Amino acid sequence: MADRLKQALPEDHASGQFIGRAHGPQGPCVIAVREGRIFDLTGVVATTAGAVIRREFDGGEEIGTVETGLPEGWTLLSPIDLQCVKAAGVTFALSAIERVIEERARGDAESAAAIRAALEDKVGAGIRAVVPGSPEAAELKSALIAEGMWSQYLEVAIGPDAEIFSKSPVLSTVGHGAPIGVRSDSNWNNPEPEVVLVCDPDGEIVGATLGNDVNLRDFEGRSALLLSKAKDNTASCAIGPFIRLFDDSFTLDDVRQANVDLVIDGPEGYRLEGTNDMGQISRDPVELVRQCLSEHHYPDGFVLFCGTLFAPTQDRDTPGAGFTHKVGDVVTISSRRIGSLRNTVMKSRDAPAWTMGIRQFSQNLAARGLIDRI
């Protein structure tokens, strides 16, 4: 566990402020990493991650160091609890092209290669250069409609309104080291390595972490109305390893400039690598948060997946069929200033059941005499 914890944190962790969660002997605990030491904040500062974010988190009981790891029997959890889990889709131009391909191919991976080449030749450069919601974007939209190439995915890629959706129920996300789930009836799917913004109830961005917003390309390619079925499944949302809070050593500009690297190591020796370059995002993170807030309210705060540039097209088994997951794939998502999130792929139906919902979470805190410190 010591090596796993140290590898999960960025190299400059000693200069940063990190909030996480772990399952201890009595249940979920909020932990902090400061100057290489690990502190249990539960019952001393606050019992939920959202509450810690809203107040100073100095103090707590020291339970270990980054070098020694968590105490015996403790395991890392997703670093969020009562926050709503939101996601922004089609925030990168190249990702938009892939969505158009999914739609045109009707979820058929073998039809995608030829469509991809033709579509990139016609509209790829134009989509990458345009500012969403601008007059130039409107002109491009008109031109694509005239050519019969318009798509609902391009609408949210370059139109005035971003795609914002609910990814996963409260308390359902999995953390670093946990299995990540893919639906058993999906035949074309991939990970989505993303920066996840962490926001307080007022919509202020207070930090960032990493996430895997698993994508079922066959389901979404058949119909955008299958988004919820494609996105919300057991263990299909991984977040972690920790929330890095903003301070003098780490700011929103570091997020804007971040590279999010992906490595997939398959059980058969297959390896795939890719990078999500946040510098190419079509909408600034602040604008994504503004559109997420809209006319909604999030009294416990929220996290927002920022979308990904990465869409794997590298063939795995059959020429022209592209990439899809296999059980046993080890997915590592990392960013130099945020950390490293690692999960192993299994079928959602076989993943550990999600049992600690809001009721059981509250009962656990009440039994520990902590319910009044949420």
Image (tube, rainbow, N blue to C red):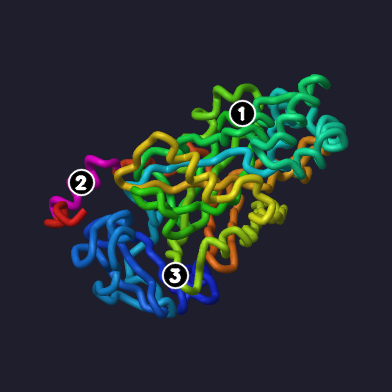
Residue 79's quadrant in the figure? bottom left
Residue range (magenta): 357-367
Circle 3 is placed at which residue position?
247
In the picture shown, does residue 129 fall above or below 122? Answer: below
SS for callout 3 = loop
SS for callout 1 = helix
In the picture shown, does residue 307 fall above or below 58? Answer: above
**Label 1 is placed on what type of residue?**
Glu
Residue drawn at the location 48% of the way across and 49% of the way down:
238
Circle 2 is placed at which residue position?
362
Q: Which mark is residue 139?
A: none
**Label 3 is placed on what type of residue?**
Asp
In which quadrant of the rendered image does the N terminus lie? bottom left
Q: What is the distance, in whole Å, between disc 3 and disc 2 at their CAs?
A: 31 Å
SS for callout 2 = helix
Among numbered discs 3 and 2, the one appearing first in the sequence: 3
- Image coordinates of residue 2 in percent, x first then y, are 44, 73
In the picture shown, does residue 350 fall above or below 257? Answer: above
Q: Is residue 78 left or right of residue 60?
A: right
Among numbered discs 1 and 3, the one appearing first in the sequence: 1
Which is in the foreground here, disc 1 or disc 3?
A: 3
Q: Nearer the viewer, residue 10 or 142?
A: 142
Residue drawn at the location 57% of the way across and 64% of the way down:
254
Residue 356's quadrant in the figure? top left
Circle 1 is placed at which residue position?
220
**Label 2 is placed on what type of residue?**
Ser
Residue drawn at the location 53% of the way across and 44% of the way down:
288
Magenta span has 116? no
Res. 19 visible in picture: yes
Q: Is residue 80 left or right of residue 150?
A: left
